[in-house]
Amino acid sequence: MESRRTPLRFKIINPHVSSVLTAEDRLASRLHLFGVVTADPSATMAAGGFVQVSNLTIPSMVELDVAVSDAQCAAEMAAGGAAMASEWAEASGIGEDDAREAISAAIRAHVAAESTQRARSIDEAWQFAAAAWAAAETALDADGRVVGAIAEALAS
């Protein structure tokens, strides 16, 4: 029976396109996320940026943005580690299991980062961000093992 190898390809795809938004546009976007579509963002900004939305206020929405950014950073680091691990493992034929683990961890980090955006509370958002960082650490550790295995093979 012939064994088929699955290529270890992992590409970094960043769906987050940076754009310049005014504070009012950013606020309107965030309010829309929480189901508030009739709020006047410029009036809200003039009132100091505070509006009650469900159980979140605008300052807590800023904290939510920080948690989302933190989780996205973790996902990007995990993706970078997985990409390098898969490239080196495929090129050398060494450390493929660890490269697969890095890819799996990068996927977990991405899922956690996406979940952070849909968090219903600040605590939940930070829990997802923590999960993203835990997965990123796993991906980077696996990448380190790939490098170690290649270095060991070259030394012998």
Image (cartoon, helix red, strand yellow):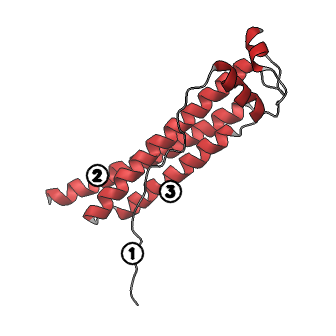
Q: Is residue 113 above or below residue 49?
A: below
Q: Amino acid at mark 3?
A: Ser
- Label 1 and label 2: CA atoms lie apart by 21 Å
Tell me if residue 33 comes above or below residue 84 in the rendering: above
In three-dimensional space, the C-alpha distance between marks 1 and 3, rounded to whole angstroms, equals 17 Å
Residues at marks 2 and 3, CA–CA distance in whole angstroms? 17 Å
Q: Which residue is mark 3?
A: 104
Q: Quadrant of residue 64?
A: top right
The crowding category of the residue bearing disc 1, from other C-alpha atoms within 10 Å (few below 14, some 14 to 19, many at least 20), is few
Residue 49, given in percent of the width and then of the height, sits at 73, 14
The residue that appears at 35% across and 54% down in the rendered structure is 85
Residue drawn at (71%, 22%) of the image: 60
- Indicate left or right for 44 with 97 as reference: right
Residue 12 placed where, x, y %? 44, 49
Residue 150: give its label. Answer: none
Residue 87 x/y as whole percent: 33, 57
Residue behind mark 2: 147
Instruction: Check disc 1 and report the residue beneath it.
Output: 5
Q: Is residue 73 left or right of residue 92?
A: right
Q: Quadrant of the N terminus?
A: bottom left
In the image, 22 versus 99, the foreground residue is 22
Residue type highlighted by circle 1: Arg
Quadrant containing the C terminus is bottom left
Q: Nearer the viewer, residue 41 or 5?
A: 41
Residue at the image position 41 percent from the left and 52 percent from the top? 82
Placement of 78 over or under 30, stated as above or below: below
Q: Earlier in the sequence, mark 1 or mark 2?
A: 1
Indicate left or right for 90 with 107 as reference.
left
